[in-house]
Image: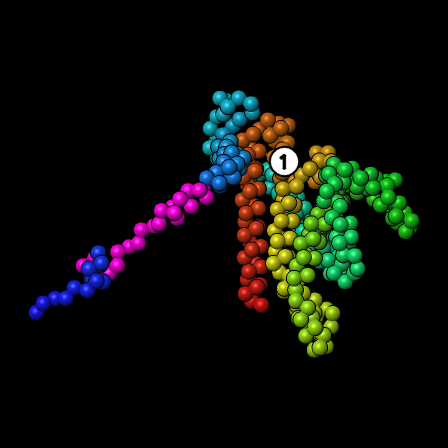
Amino acid sequence: MATTVTPADADSGSPGGGSPPRRRPRHRTRQTVVAYLFLTPSLLFFAVFLLLPLLFAVLLSLSRWAGFDLADIRPAGTDNFAALFARGSAFLTPVLTNTLLYALGTVALALAGAVLVSHCITRLRFQGLWRTLYFLPIVTTVVAVGNVWKYMYEPGGLVNGVLNALGLDSVAFLQDPATALPSVVVVQAWASLGSAILVLTAGLKSIPRSYYEAAELDGAGQLTVFARITLPLLRPSLLFVCVTQFIAGLQSFALIIVMTGEGGPGDATNVAALEMYQRAFKYGDWGSASAAALVLFVLILVITLAQLWLFRRKGADS
C-alpha cells in the first residue's frame, strides 16, 4: 500500500512528525543586546560602588589592616568576629542592644505618629500645605536638627522651660544615661515623620470611598472602621514605612554624634554604626570595623525578611 506524504509531514523535521524547535528571531537577540548596552552604566555603577566595596569589606573582616597601605593587610581568619562576640565584649552589650532599642523606638514613635497625623490630614482642607509642613524636617540637615534639639534639651532650654512651667523639675536629657537614648530616639522619630506621612497619606487616598460608605450604612463606629477597613487596606504602605524606617534606624549614627559627641554619656547612646565609625577612623582597626559592618548587614537583612514574612502572613490570615 502506498504511503501518502502530506505537506505537514514533509515539513516535519523529526521522525515523529513533531515540529522542530523554533529558533529565536534575530531581532529579539538584537533587542536583548541593546537592552544590556543601555543597562551597562547602571551595572558598572552597581559593581564599582556597591559590589566591590562589599567584597572588600568581606576581605577586611577576615584580615587585620590599619588603613592606607594595602600591602599591610594580614589574614586573621575569624578572629575579628570572635572578638566581637567574646564574653565581655561591648559590641553585644550595650552596642547592639542600643541599636535595636534605637530602631524599635524610632519605628514605633514615627509609625504611630504618622498614622495619626495622616488620618487627620485626609480630613482637613489644604492637605498639600500640611504635608509640606510635616516634610520640612526631611530637607533640613542632620547637623541643624541635632543642634537645635540639643539646645532645646539643655537645662535652660525650651523643653525644661515647659516642664518648669508645669511645676516639674528639670531633666538632664542628654547627660543622664537613663534618658539620653530615649531623648535621641524622639528626635530621630520627629525628623523621619515627614516621609512616613507622605507615604501613608497616599495610601489613605487610594482606599475607595465605597468601603467607608458601606460601613457608615451598616452603622460601624470610627474605631471599627479604622481597625477593620483603614489598617488592613493600608498594609502595603505600612510595610514600606516599617521596613525603610527600621533600616534607617539601624544604620543611623550622624544624629547621635551631633547630639552626644561619641555615644555618651559612657556608652548609653553608642550604636553599631557609630561603633564601626570609631573602630575604623579613630582606632584604625578596619578589620574589626568591617566585621561589625557585616554583622549589622546580616541583622538588617534578617529583620527586613522577618517584617516581610509577618506582613504577608497577616495578609493571608485576613
Report helix, strand or loop for mark 1: helix
Mark 1 Cα shell of 10 Å, populated few (<14), some (14-19), many (≥20):
many
Asked if residue 49 lies left or right of residue 160, the reply is left
Asked if residue 308 lies left or right of residue 234, the reply is left
Per the image, the residue denoted by label 1 is 275
Asked if residue 94 lies left or right of residue 184, the reply is left
Residue 255 picture quarter: top right
Q: Is residue 208 magenta?
A: no
Residue appearing at x 88%, y 40% in the figure = 156
Residue at the far left: name it: 1
Residue appearing at x 56%, y 38% in the figure = 293
Query: The magenta stretch spans which residues?
Result: 14-36
Q: Amino acid at mark 1?
A: Glu
Towards the viewer: 94 or 174: 174
Q: Is residue 48 visible?
A: yes
Task: Give how far across and how far down residue 45 sits, in percent.
Answer: 52, 36
Residue appearing at x 79%, y 60% in the figure = 124
